Image (cartoon, rainbow, N blue to C red):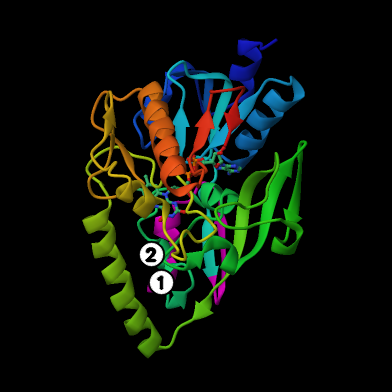
Amino acid sequence: MLNMQELLSLVKGRVAIGEEMREHTSFRIGGPADFFIEPMDRQDFIRAVGFFTSRRIPFVILGRGSNILVHDEGIRGGVIMTGTALQQFSIKKQQVEADAGVSVSLLAEKTFSSSLGGIELLQGIPGTVGGAVRMNAGAWGQEIFQVLSWVEVLRGGRTSVLYPDELEYGYRQGGFGSEIVLRAGFRLKRLSEREHAERSRRVQEIRLQRARTQPLSFPNAGSVFKNPERSIGGESLSAGALIDRCGLKGYSCGGALVSELHGNFIVNTGSASAADVMKLVEVIRNRVAERFGVVLELEIGLLGFDGVICR
Ligand SMILES: Cc1cc2nc3c(=O)[nH]c(=O)nc-3n(C[C@H](O)[C@H](O)[C@H](O)COP(=O)(O)OP(=O)(O)OC[C@H]3O[C@@H](n4cnc5c(N)ncnc54)[C@H](O)[C@@H]3O)c2cc1C
């Protein structure tokens, strides 16, 4: 059983009971977490994880909650945030090291302004390094694992270093099990002035494209479904294109709406519940399966739906 006094005396950062998860997700959806912890620093983070692990109380690690849907009833167990505790990063020549709680977008911006290429197109991804490594985040042909050298993880109370060839990573999956990402190392490419200028133009184009094609003024969790890996009728169609062809843009369930701008984005128009989103997910899956014979796989993670996490 959880001894609150013990938890409070152990963790130096913020500990809250019944914290509304909608405050910590980009979807602005999700009920209360039993125990919500924002550790102060790395040691505090490791202590908080140790507390839950040793008592076999389920818990989940979150960065910025930008790739998840939390159940309306919330999360039974603990939620431990990386944002405050894991914030160090360094750039030395072509080697970059970043803690799990660092913003991916900030890292992409800082490295590119230091004339390093490889993750500049990840500017605009609203998550953390930990979340991005965990799911091999990517955009416009660049993926985290293309430049990942190593990742420091916490597993069963011990830290260790894993290398990409030890992980079965792939499209939007890092191949991790219960490992918690603490820190990661990347090797980027030193850019010449000409290369930097060329890539700057591309970065600018992508920034405009994101603004034009993504519903950034409504709460959302990015792409809801992964793109299918096989071609359909000889065409390589994205999940968004399939949803669009089913005429589902603008379709809504309660407060959840398929964005008019991008078929693979579900937005919260203000009062969406997780149940609304899940109903919409079912409608989309059924329509796409009936018309194209493809079962779309979720890219967002579900928290609190069945146990602590499922994908
Ligand atoms: C507007 C918008 C645009 C987006 N664009 C893109 C895009 O272009 N490309 C893309 O790939 N994604 C995109 N995303 C999705 C999302 O931002 C990324 O997947 C991001 O990497 C998630 O990071 P996070 O810190 O928010 O993870 P969270 O949502 O907090 O967590 C996601 C999963 O990772 C796990 N996790 C988080 N941190 C750790 C850790 N330290 N160790 C172990 N597990 C951890 C969580 O338990 C959860 O299972 C977008 C999202 C939005 C809202």
User: Which quadrant is the N terminus positioned in?
Assistant: top right
Picture coordinates of residue 235, whole percent (x, y): 43, 65
Query: For the residue with label 1, is its CB less than 8 Å from the closest atom of ligand 1?
Result: no
**16 up-or-down from 26: above or below:** above
Nearest the eye: 44 or 143: 143
Q: Is residue 303 left or right of residue 267?
A: right
Task: Find disc 1 in the rendering and name its residue.
Answer: 112
Q: Are marks 2 and 1 in contact (CB under 8 Å)?
A: yes
Residue at screen point 69% across, 62% down: 164
Q: Of 270 and 204, which appears nearest the observer?
A: 270
Residue 284 quadrant:
top left
**Residue 54 or residue 244, whichever sits in front:** 244
111 in magenta: yes
**What amino acid type should be assigned to the residue bearing mark 1?**
Phe
Location of residue 4 with respect to 269 vertically, above or below: above
Q: Residue at x 25, y 39 (%)?
A: 218
Answer few, some or many: residues within 10 Å of disc 1's Cα (few below 14, many 20 plus, some between 14 and 19).
many
- Amino acid type at circle 2 is Glu
Give SS at disc 1.
helix
Q: Alpha carbon of mark 2 to alpha carbon of mark 1: how far? A: 5 Å
Q: Quadrant of the C terminus?
A: top right
Which residue is depicted at the point 55% across and 53% down? 172
Residue 261 pos. (x, y %): 24, 49
Q: In the figure, residue 147 lies in which quadrant? A: bottom right
**Magenta-drawn segment:** 92-113
Secondary element type, mark 2? helix
Q: Is residue 120 above or below residue 278?
A: below
Q: Residue at x 62, y 18 (%)?
A: 7
Observer able to see residue 263: no
| Mark linked to residue 109 | 2
In magenta stretch: residue 102: yes
